[in-house]
Image: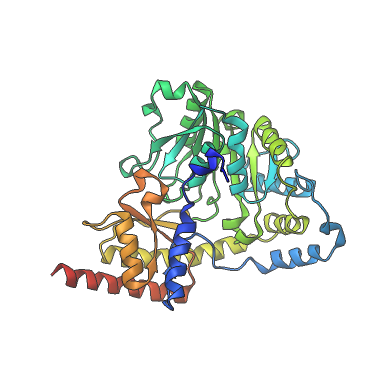
Amino acid sequence: MRLAKRVEKLPPYLFVEISRKIAEKKAKGEEVISFAIGDPDIPTPQHIVDRLCEAARDPVNHRYPESESLPELRRAVADWYKRRFDISFDPDKEVLPLIGSKEGIGHISFCFIGNGDIALVPDPGYPVYSVSTMLADGEPYYLPLKEENNWLPDLDSVPQNVLERARLLWINYPNNPTAAVADLEFFNRVVKFAKQHDLVVCHDGPYTEVAYDGYQPVSFMQAEGARDIGVEFHSLSKSYNMTGWRIGMAVGNATMINALMRLKSNLDSGIPQAIQYAAIEALSGPQDCIQEHNAIYQRRRDLIIEVLNEIGLEAEPPKASLYIWAKVPEGYNSMDLTADLLEQVGVAVTPGIGYGKQGEGYVRLSLTIPDAALVKGLSRLSGWSNTRRRVAK
C-alpha cells in the first residue's frame, strides 16, 4: 500500500502522542493527573443542553442539514458579534458556521494555498496552521513568537523572497499556547501589512470570552480594514464548554467565506441541526455562565501560578485563554521536564517544543482540570520539587 506523500510527511498530532503516553501509565494501574489538554471540564450550561434535547426529538432535525447551516444560526452569530464587539456582519454572506473551528482552520488553506505557496505561521502555534498548509502542498514559514516581543510576531523581519510567495498569514490572540494577548494597535498593523503584501489573514480567536481580572479581549475584525483581507475563526467550545458538540464559526470577508463554504459543501454535510439549535440558544440566551466559568478558571490560575513559581517553573498569570505558559527549570528541556513529571509524580503537561521550535524551554498547563484533581496535581508538583532538590544535593 502506498500512501500519498502529503500524509507520509505529516508529524503525529501532538495530543495523540500525549494521550498515548498517559494511556500507557493508566494501563499499569497508575493514576495520571493531566494538565495537558484544553478541554473544559465544566459541563455545557443546562439551558443549552435542554434546547439540544428538545431539538433532537424533532424528526425534522434527523435529516441532512444544509452546508451553510440554518439562517437562524447565521443570524445568531451576527447578532452575537454585534453585541459583543459592535461589528455588523451580513449573515448570508459574511458568516459561516463550522463543525468546530478546527474544521474551518484545516480547510481554508485549500482555498488560498497551492503548490509552492507560503503561509506565515506563528511559532509556537496551534499545529493545525502548519499542518493544513502542508496538506495543501504549501510551505509554512515560521514567525518566531518571543517573550521579549510580548509573544507578537515581528512582521517586518519576514524576508522579501518569502513575502513574494506568501499568500496567507495566521494570527491567534488570546494565544495558544503562550496565553499572550494583542490589542487593536497590533491588529491594525497586521491589516496594513497584509494589504501591502497582498496577503489574506486568518485570525483564530476562540478564547476571546475566557478572560480574567476584568480584561476584555478584542476581535481582529474590529481593526480598520480587517474585513477587506481577513476572516476570524471562533468557537462555542471554550466560551460555552461545548467541545464535544463540535460547533464554531468563521466571520469576515465575503469572498473568503464563500470560498470556504464552497469547499466545505463538497467535503461535509453540515452541522447536525439539533446542535445548531443548541448553538442558537448559547449565543442568544443568558450569558451569565461565561463569567461564572471564568471565575472558576481564574481561581485555578492563581493556585497553579503560585505552585509553579515555588518549584522553579517561572510563569506570569495570563490575562486570557485556558493556559499557563511556564519556563522549564535550568537543566531541563521541555521534553525532559514533561517526561520527568509524568514518570516521577504522574503529572502530565504539554512540552512547548510540540508547538514549534520556539516553544522549547517552556511547558503549557491547562486550567481545564476538575478541582479535586487540581489539588492533587499541585500537591504532586510540590512533591516533585522536593524530590528534585534531594537529587541536586
Q: Residue 319: x percent and y percent? A: 43, 53
Question: Compared to 216, does 38 lie above or below?
Answer: below
Q: Residue 65: x percent and y percent? A: 79, 50
Question: Compared to 82, does 56 lie above or below?
Answer: below
269 with respect to 312 (left or right): right
Q: Who's the residue at 81% across and 52% down the image? A: 64
Q: Residue 176: x percent and y percent? A: 46, 50
Q: How is the image coloured?
A: rainbow
Q: In the figure, residue 348 lies in which quadrant?
A: bottom left
Q: Nearer the viewer, residue 371 or 270?
A: 270
Q: Residue furthest left?
A: 393
Question: Compared to 183, does 227 lie above or below?
Answer: above
Q: Who's the residue at 32% across and 49% down the image? A: 360
111 with respect to 317 (left or right): right
Q: Residue furthest bottom?
A: 29
Quadrant housing the C terminus: bottom left
Q: Residue furthest front?
A: 1
Q: In the figure, residue 339 lies in which quadrant?
A: bottom left
Q: Residue 249: x percent and y percent? A: 65, 46
**Residue 94 appears anywhere in the view:** no
**Residue 332 appears anywhere in the view:** yes
Q: Who's the residue at 25% across and 69% down the image? A: 385
Report the label total.
Answer: 0
280 with respect to 87 (left or right): right
